[in-house]
Amino acid sequence: MSGLRRHTIWLMPVLSALIIWGLWHGAAAWIEYAKMAQPGVEPDEAASVRRILLPLPGEILSAFWANRSLILHATGNTFLGALLGFLAAVGAGGAIALLLGLSRSIKRALYPWVLVLQMTPIIIMAPIFALWLGQGIASIVAITFTIGFFPVVANTTMGLISTDKNLLDLFAVCQATRRQELLYLRIPYAMPYFLTGVKIAGTLAPLGAITGDILVGNSASGRAGIGFLTIIFRGNLNVPALYATAGVACLLGFCFVGAVNVFHWWALRHWHDSVARKDQ
Amino acid sequence: MTAPLVVFQHLAKRYGKGTLVLDDFNLSVEPNEFVSFIGPSGCGKSTVLKLVAGLTPATEGEVRVGEQDARAARDSLFLVFQEANLLPWLRVRDNVGLPLRLRGTDAARRQARVDQMIELVGLEESSEQFPWQLSAGMRMRVAIARALSVSPQILLLDEPFAALDEMTRDKLNEELLDIRQKDPFTAFFVTHSVAEAVFLSSRVVVMSTKPGRVARVIDVPFDYPRRAELRESGAYLSLLAETAQALREVNRL
């Protein structure tokens, strides 16, 4: 039974991939057939239309290979924007949360502004960032930062203010100073909350960088990212390359989230219920 | 007669604008006494400990430890909570050494004391483990080792064994008395168990409720060290019956 279950882990995704591959080819053949059934449509013309509506997996791979340098370079640029924005969101988000968690007065003063930043649609913020920072990486980082900042602040603040009352009593009995209470209790206690915020920010970072690239990107001197590339490929009707770019963007997202998940596991591996007991 | 170590004088406590939890609570405790507090739920047993520990201020009256107000005497006491209350991200030895670390004890002295305490509670083999890897009884031993690491003059124990099964609880009761033989302290012990109170204490304070007051103080005449066999003696069983009767009378009031 356990052997069968072990094989099922690999078999099911492979099986589902084969089914999708078959359905994909079936749908493409049906589109081509339906087009050819129209009077006066040549087979080549039908194939071209089908390639725009639904390119085959093989065509997408060929398009990727043909544009690999362009796509990988753009992916690198997007990765850089996502990484810088993510790090800024995590650093500043954590620091602001510390301030908010330290005192109710500071929270009352600052939290509304954090909400203002979160509630203003990014599509409206983007041109403002472009005016302040110019088209390109700085504005992209600012957009990624804005998207990732709130989950880090909200989660970490929640962790800092929800410290177990009994543990606070323990520190009071130990006559801990406020600094000790923060360092040895509140911050470690808030760590799982913070890391949940980091995970959300990590999921949003590639999305933020691609959106930023579309809204305020700069294609000069090879600085185009994935977002800009999609605009170019769409303009050229190079749909297989567009799909290839989507695939690479998806892969980038997986890598980013995977790295953040590894960090989450590493930070909590010894003690937190979410990871520790599964390892034993 | 020895001078009392802890004196409760006309102590009253009200949380916020709620009802009076304690009123006119008076008691004197001598050094090295083991005093258990027993009474119906909500009679203010845990509040008594919180007042001694300085975790909450008295509404009226005062608690004096030696010549000082209890809040000024925090160096000389420690509280063991109902839950072990260990920091889940610290290993056993770091949990035991936490109070010393917070009090600024240097690393060498701290480690020596931690080793001593871990040996005292018999957790040498688990010293590098995390709390989740321990049983409930072991976690409570860590909490006791942590409390004793600062050599408190007074140890406050708030139903520390309430969540444990009866066998583990009996075993830990005996271990607690053994530890106290080696490392003496004055104990204030809150419990719901009459058997536990009689087995451990030199005096059992039966409390009435709404508001909490000292209803009766029962002296326990058995010498320390006490062994498990005491639980089967006639004198112990008779005292158990007397204490249970006192508790029933208080509940009827």
Image (cartoon, helix red, strand yellow):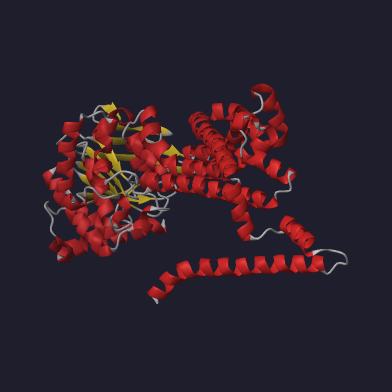
Between residues A142 and B59, which one lies in front from this camera angle?
Answer: A142
Q: Give the position of the N terminus of chain A as an image quadrant.
A: bottom left
Which residue is rendered at x = 25% and y = 57% of the image?
Answer: B196
Query: Quick check: B40 above or below B60?
Result: below
Where is residue A59? Give x, y as percent: 64, 57
Q: Give the position of the C terminus of chain A as an image quadrant.
A: bottom left
Which residue is rendered at x = 64% and y = 29% of the image?
Answer: A220
- The extreme bottom residue here reads A1
Query: Quick check: A58 above or below A151?
Result: below
- The extreme top residue here reads A132
Query: In screen coordinates, is B71 left or right of B183?
Result: right
Which quadrant holds residue B12?
top left
Between residues B146 and A158, which one lies in front from this camera angle?
Answer: A158
Where is residue B248? Give x, y as percent: 35, 60
Residue A121 visible (yes or no): no
- The extreme right residue here reads A39
Which quadrant holds residue B27?
top left
Where is residue B115? Give x, y as percent: 16, 42
What is the total number of numbered labels drawn onto the structure image? 0
Query: In screen coordinates, is A103 left or right of B68?
Result: right
Where is residue B145? Give x, y as percent: 22, 45
Which quadrant holds residue B40?
bottom left
Residue A48 visible (yes or no): yes
